[in-house]
Amino acid sequence: DAGVIQSPRHEVTEMGQEVTLRCKPISGHDYLFWYRQTMMRGLELLIYFNNNVPIDDSGMPEDRFSAKMPNASFSTLKIQPSEPRDSAVYFCASSGDRSRQPQHFGDGTRLSIL
Amino acid sequence: GESVGLHLPTLSVQEGDNSIINCAYSNSASDYFIWYKQESGKGPQFIIDIRSNMDKRQGQRVTVLLNKTVKHLSLQIAATQPGDSAVYFCAENMWNQGGKLIFGQGTELSVKP
């Protein structure tokens, strides 16, 4: 079975540039989550969607970050403009309905902003 | 100034021994708990979960114990193997938080051959 697919796996860009991270959740999953992982703060939830609708974006750091889910099989996380402090590993995860199903993670995008 | 990263607790065990990784969760209203394993360069991988109406659940070589009285969760790995070396995270979920999980800081397990 295909798991959560993220692209790109690695991204290196200069500060000020726009960065777009992509995620394809597991087919049939209703929930999609974006996380950021750093040594300083560990794993942080940025935003999550249910049936393509954003439910909780309280973890989004600031207006430079935005996320969309135009359909059930695709989501993007965009940073514009990017800053060096945005360097981190960004994970996407998906899960089934709310009756207690675990989230399944992709292998992440390692983002470096120079 | 110098940045300081999270200092992960570390557990070092001999191959073949049993490992016990502990987690204190934060919210007494949490009713669903998950253990994840994260290897270097990969995303967290689901290991086992448990609902709050249970005290114990067993999988293949793993057992999760839940003590709601003291808000404590543990993961036991039997006959630990070098491939078990990774960072292990516990996560908690509350029924009224949809699918939202709160993750612990993680424990690094190192298996010596």
Image: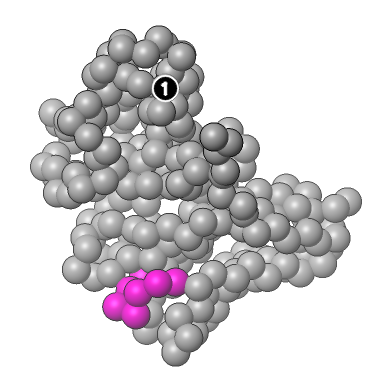
Residue occupying the far right of the picture = B113
Question: Residue placed at 11% from the left, 42% from the top?
Answer: A53
- Give left or right: position of B26 versus B67: left
Which residue does the numbered mark 1 point to in the structure image? A84
Relative to A76, say whether A48 is above or below: below
> Measuring 48% from the left and 60% from the top, which residue is drawn there?
B104
Give the percent coordinates (x, y) of residue B14: 85, 60
Residue A38 location (% of width, % of height): 48, 39
**At 36% across and 37% down in the image, what residue appears?**
A92
**Quadrant position of the N terminus of chain B in the picture:** top right
Task: Say whether residue B87 is visible.
Answer: yes
Q: Nearer the viewer, residue A34 or B10?
A: B10
Vertical side of B109 occupied by A62: above or below: above
As for residue B112 lying within the magenta part, the answer is no
How many C-alpha atoms fall within 10 Å of the one at disc 1: few (<14), some, or many (≥20)?
some
As helix, strand or loop, the secondary structure at mark 1 comes to helix
Estimate the x, y position of residue B54 in percent, counting from the top left.
43, 83
Residue B57 at least partly seen: no
- Report in which chain the residue with disc 1 lies: A
Tell me the kind of residue under disc 1.
Pro
Magenta-tinted stretch: B25-32
Quarter of the view holding residue B99: bottom left
- Magenta stretch secondary structure, dominant: loop
Residue A21 appears in which quarter of the rendering? top left
Residue found at the far front of this picture: B1
